[in-house]
């Protein structure tokens, strides 16, 4: 791929040690042999994320991710048939409670309390069959390292690394929780997820700002919805809804699993087929119809609170399949990469008005058209307005002047070097293989992308800048420091909203 | 590359775990356990490649680790002496030194010019200041090794500290000071550390406008001249090279350096905190950050192994007592964790932390305290002990599954004077830990009268008042204004 031409890093070398198998049920498995040490990493990518949360159920994809650690019919229970019956009663009791709870007219407080009691009792009964956290505990006892999962707007991912003699154990566990999860302890986990919301959003100035920014930037596309879920919605989702989500989106044809490390494709593929092949096939989920309409005017959110100022703005851009995808990467690099980057030089080094200033792309995702965003953190005594003016000056320069040869060259060299550096790590490789296979239908795109990087020209950058960085396409979110009105602790000085 | 810029997490993904924890309990099995029937063949024989160690006559230590998978070479020069060794009235000196060192450049090349040359090669040469060390790192394609290593050596031997780059570093630190009370989690972590170690400890103190104002250019030069001595340095290089040729290059570069006086760290007195409740009110949050903190231990403590197993039982992962109780059973927190910490050459901290909605602040804190108390009264069951040890031992391979990890481990051990086979010894010692050992160390080290509680949260939403936990002291977190600033 690069002129360097060493053998372990080019596509030909990966061709030799990478095998793709699409099982009859539609699930894609990638096995990449990298026998450096007797360990392996896996990455399961479910091609559904927070964007796929059904209306009124924001946060459901993420909620399901948490449930995927609760076990299966075989793991996490002392008696599955009895537990299944008990869980059905929980749902019945919850539905009754929830129906009364949501009544806008004629809600009966006594009845509600009684239904709540029945719901609590049903949960208690179901919990008697639970072996709490047995699923992750088996993994951890067997040496799982970096065990975690993540829900982004675009996908839901599960991953860990293990000693290679646990490969079959992993296949048993992973196929079980993907194909046959049991949504036990759902309502307690819902409380945990609400704590996650409080931590990431409600109690974090940046979290609050980003949520408002996205909600303002998008009028139609679900990128504008809170990924962790609006408080009212995430506090009311049910296990029944989560099961319905699983049925639609965790269908094998919507899943790619990559395994990298001390594994042999010849023996691994048949073994994986034995476990993952039993997951019933289903229709591929329908593609989303919603396309964000063109923005009509600049939109601004000013959050006035007792937090130091912060400036963020974003511009709608096309998704990752766009021919200009690499052009946006080039702009990001020229704006943000290191101390030679334009924003650093202008705002941080020369004008001395910001502690940090950077641009980044694919916010909050890039499967669908996301934002190219720029933020700046003002130094004490400097304002959001100064950030805005300086950022716009840099954006305008991109539209009117060619970038230098050196800037373009730096982007290309570094982008290629970064790609290479990512190839010597099981976990990182598994993620990339799964992602490229999901996004392009072929992991080889990882290497083919180099050509797109090389093809970016100065004219491309100017053209894309002229098209993208226009007033009507801009959304701004900023924090404006405002001292509390009184010394009274009980009066949080928090106001704000779209202008 | 901008290692010193503030990092802002605008794109944090959601996840099932807040922090990567590691283990566990329970098993009241009636159902068959099919997973136990799955064969676990013996692990392939594997001997991690150890780096080659060379000690020069001037006392400088070199580690070489060949790794031919990718065409890169990475290097690091670790230099004894860090922020814990800086004067109390100049806190921030080492951080500023680490920033201005590389950004200033050398006698023959300005930092800005170096930025440009290196970026064109997708290479890095960076300096940084840490707690116990400062360092120079470099990384490049293997064919660029000579010029890039040349820059690293030029930075090491011929720095040219410049006032404008010191000022740039100061403006970064000042921004951090101004913003340090914006985020509740940040406040809690900082205050908890000061409560555990004492507020003036080199392990907890932080920069103030006055301490960074006190740092002048000659301080950076003096720090450099004092610390850059070969007998206080460890050089490690990994990547795609031939060791013999690399050794020759490094000898040529480092052998001319003359020995000097090594920085000797004077450890402060470590005093356990007193049982107390400290509080910071934050009106704009709906979740409390709760820390329970005290002093921990050192890794060379013979009880380190039993404490490690105790930690696994207590807070090691999904199956651990703390996680099972506070998160899974009670649903009171997403983020909960901690443990009895151990550092290489000074006591770590015993920290138990959780974030819980305002109204359950007291309930969650009590649940955490209960689990701490149970460590002494409820010995690990055979299942808990097995689970805890399995978790440590079965994941042990991940201590050395890459050549880079093996190299870094050897550098750390050498730096702190630990035996090179520390990991092997650790493994053997963990295997021998018994339930009695765990109870013994829990009894010996866990003392609730030496643990303080720090809460950062929104008082108006607590419901149950905080003084249910004991008398409450409100912490003053007001930021002292810069020297000479007009009074508000």
Image: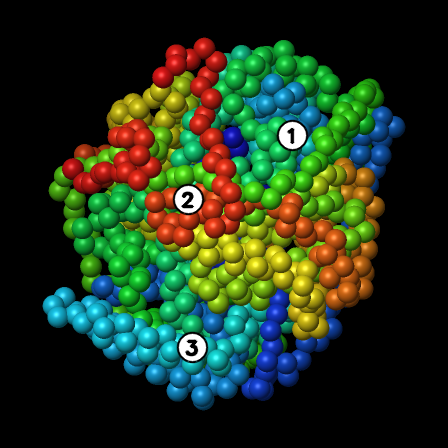
Could you say which disc has been placed on residue A124 in the image? 3
Q: Are marks 2 and 1 on the same chain?
A: yes
Q: Quadrant of the C terminus of chain B?
A: top left
The reply to whether the C-beta atoms of the residues labelled 2 and 1 are less than 8 Å apart is: no
Q: What residue is shown with label 1?
A: B202
Which quadrant of the structure image shows residue A493?
Answer: top left
Mark 1, residues whose alpha carbon is within 10 Å: few (<14), some, or many (≥20)?
many
Q: Give the camera-side residue of A464 and B236.
A: B236
Residue B472 placement (x, y as % from top left): 49, 41
For marks 2 and 3, give the CA distance: 31 Å
**Between residues A242 and B406, which one lies in front from this camera angle?**
A242
Q: Are marks 2 and 3 in contact (CB under 8 Å)?
A: no
| Chain of the residue that carries numbered disc 1 in the rendered image | B
Q: Mark 2 belongs to which subunit?
A: B
Q: Position of residue A34 (x, y in %)?
A: 62, 61
Say which of A497 and B34 sits in front.
A497
Q: Residue at x 47, y 46 (%)?
A: B467
The quadrant in which residue B258 appears is top right
Q: Which residue appears at 79% of the width and 24% of the height?
A: B262
Q: Is residue B254 visible?
A: no
Helix, strand or loop at label 1? It is loop
- Residue picked out by circle 2: B457
């Amino acid at each position: 791929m690069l002129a360097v031409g060493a053998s372990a890093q080019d596509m030909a070398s990966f061709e030799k040690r990478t095998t793709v198998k699409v099982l009859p049920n539609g699930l894609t498995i990638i096995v990449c042999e990298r026998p450096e040490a007797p360990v392996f990493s896996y990455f399961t990518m479910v091609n559904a994320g927070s964007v796929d949360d059904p209306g009124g159920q924001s946060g459901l994809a993420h909620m399901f991710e948490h449930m995927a650690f609760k076990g299966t019919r075989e793991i996490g229970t002392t008696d599955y048939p009895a537990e299944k019956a008990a869980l059905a009663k929980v749902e019945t009791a919850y539905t009754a409670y929830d129906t009364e709870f949501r009544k806008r007219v004629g809600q009966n407080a006594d009845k509600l309390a009684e239904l709540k009691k029945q719901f609590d009792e049903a949960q208690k009964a179901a919990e008697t069959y639970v072996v709490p956290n047995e699923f992750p505990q088996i993994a951890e006892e067997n040496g799982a390292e970096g065990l975690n999962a993540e829900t982004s707007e675009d996908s839901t991912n599960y991953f860990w690394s293990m000693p290679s003699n646990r490969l079959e154990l992993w296949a048993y566990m992973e196929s079980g929780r993907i194909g046959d999860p049991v949504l036990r302890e759902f309502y307690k986990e819902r409380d945990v997820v609400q704590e996650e919301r409080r931590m990431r959003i409600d109690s974090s100035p940046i979290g609050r700002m980003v949520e408002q920014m996205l909600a303002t930037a998008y009028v139609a596309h679900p990128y504008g919805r809170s990924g962790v879920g609006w408080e009212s919605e995430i506090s009311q989702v049910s296990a029944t809804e989560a099961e319905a989500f699983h049925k639609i989106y965790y269908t094998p044809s919507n899943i790619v699993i990559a395994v990298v490390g001390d594994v042999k494709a010849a023996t691994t593929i048949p073994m994986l087929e034995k476990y993952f092949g039993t997951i019933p096939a289903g229709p591929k989920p329908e593609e989303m119809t919603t396309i964000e309409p063109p923005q009509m005017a600049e939109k601004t959110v000013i959050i006035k609170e007792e937090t130091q100022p912060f400036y963020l703005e974003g511009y709608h851009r096309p998704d990752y399949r766009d021919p200009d995808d690499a052009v946006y990467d080039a702009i990001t690099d020229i704006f943000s990469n290191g101390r030679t980057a334009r924003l650093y030089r202008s705002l941080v080094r020369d004008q001395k008005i910001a502690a940090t200033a950077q641009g980044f792309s694919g916010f909050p995702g890039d499967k669908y058209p996301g934002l190219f965003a720029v933020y700046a953190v003002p130094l004490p005594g400097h304002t959001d307005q100064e950030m805005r003016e300086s950022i716009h000056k840099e954006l305008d320069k991109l539209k009117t002047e060619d970038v230098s040869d050196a800037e373009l060259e730096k982007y290309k060299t570094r982008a290629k070097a970064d790609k290479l550096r990512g190839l010597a790590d099981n976990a990182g490789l598994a993620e990339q293989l799964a992602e490229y296979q999901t996004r392009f239908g072929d992991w080889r795109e990882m290497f083919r992308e180099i050509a797109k990087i090389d093809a970016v020209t100065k004219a491309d950058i100017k053209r894309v800048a002229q098209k993208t960085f226009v007033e009507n396409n801009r959304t701004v979110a900023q924090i404006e420091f405002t001292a509390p009105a009184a010394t009274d602790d009980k009066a949080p000085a928090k106001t704000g909203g779209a202008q | 590359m901008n290692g010193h810029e503030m990092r802002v997490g605008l794109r944090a993904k959601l996840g099932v775990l807040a922090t990567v924890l590691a283990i566990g309990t329970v098993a009241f099995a009636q159902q068959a356990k099919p997973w136990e029937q799955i064969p676990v063949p013996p692990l392939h024989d594997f001997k991690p490649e150890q780096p080659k160690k060379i000690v020069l006559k001037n006392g400088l230590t070199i580690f070489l680790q060949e790794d031919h998978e990718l065409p890169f070479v990475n290097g690091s020069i670790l230099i004894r002496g860090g922020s814990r060794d800086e004067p109390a009235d100049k806190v921030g000196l080492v951080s500023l030194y680490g920033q201005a060192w590389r950004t200033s450049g050398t006698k023959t090349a300005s930092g800005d010019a170096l930025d440009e040359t290196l970026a064109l090669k997708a290479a890095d040469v960076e300096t940084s200041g840490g707690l116990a060390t400062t360092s120079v790192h470099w990384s490049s394609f293997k064919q660029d090794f000579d010029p890039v290593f040349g820059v690293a050596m030029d930075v090491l031997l011929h720095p040219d500290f410049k006032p404008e780059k010191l000022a740039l570093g100061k403006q970064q630190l000042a921004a951090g000071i101004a913003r340090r009370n914006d985020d509740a989690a940040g406040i809690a972590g900082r205050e908890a550390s000061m409560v555990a170690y004492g507020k003036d400890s080199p392990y907890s103190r932080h920069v103030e406008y006055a301490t960074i104002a006190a740092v002048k250019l000659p301080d950076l030069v003096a720090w450099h001249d004092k610390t850059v001595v070969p007998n206080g340095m460890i050089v490690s290089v990994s990547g795609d090279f031939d060791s013999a040729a690399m050794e020759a290059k490094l000898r040529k570069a480092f052998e001319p350096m003359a020995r000097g006086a090594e920085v000797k760290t004077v450890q402060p007195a470590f005093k356990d905190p007193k049982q107390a409740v400290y509080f910071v009110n934050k009106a704009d949050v709906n979740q409390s950050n709760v820390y329970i903190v005290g002093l921990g231990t050192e890794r060379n403590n013979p009880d380190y192994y039993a404490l490690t197993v105790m930690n696994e039982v207590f807070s090691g992962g999904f199956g651990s007592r703390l996680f099972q109780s506070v998160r899974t059973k009670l649903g009171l927190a997403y983020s909960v964790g901690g443990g009895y910490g151990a550092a290489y050459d000074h006591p770590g901290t015993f920290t138990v932390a959780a974030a819980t909605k305002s109204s359950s602040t007291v309930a969650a804190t009590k649940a955490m305290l209960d689990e701490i108390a149970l460590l002494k009264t409820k010995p690990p069951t055979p299942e808990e002990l097995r689970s805890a040890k399995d978790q440590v031992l079965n994941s042990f391979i991940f201590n050395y599954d890459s050549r880079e990890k093996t190299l870094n481990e050897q550098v750390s051990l050498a730096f702190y004077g630990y035996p090179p086979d520390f990991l092997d010894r650790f493994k053997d010692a963990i295997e021998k830990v018994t339930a009695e050992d765990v109870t013994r160390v829990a009894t010996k080290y866990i003392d609730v009268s030496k643990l303080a509680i720090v809460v950062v949260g929104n008082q108006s939403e607590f419901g149950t008042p905080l003084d249910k936990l004991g008398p409450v002291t409100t912490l003053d977190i007001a930021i002292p204004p810069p020297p000479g600033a007009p009074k508000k």
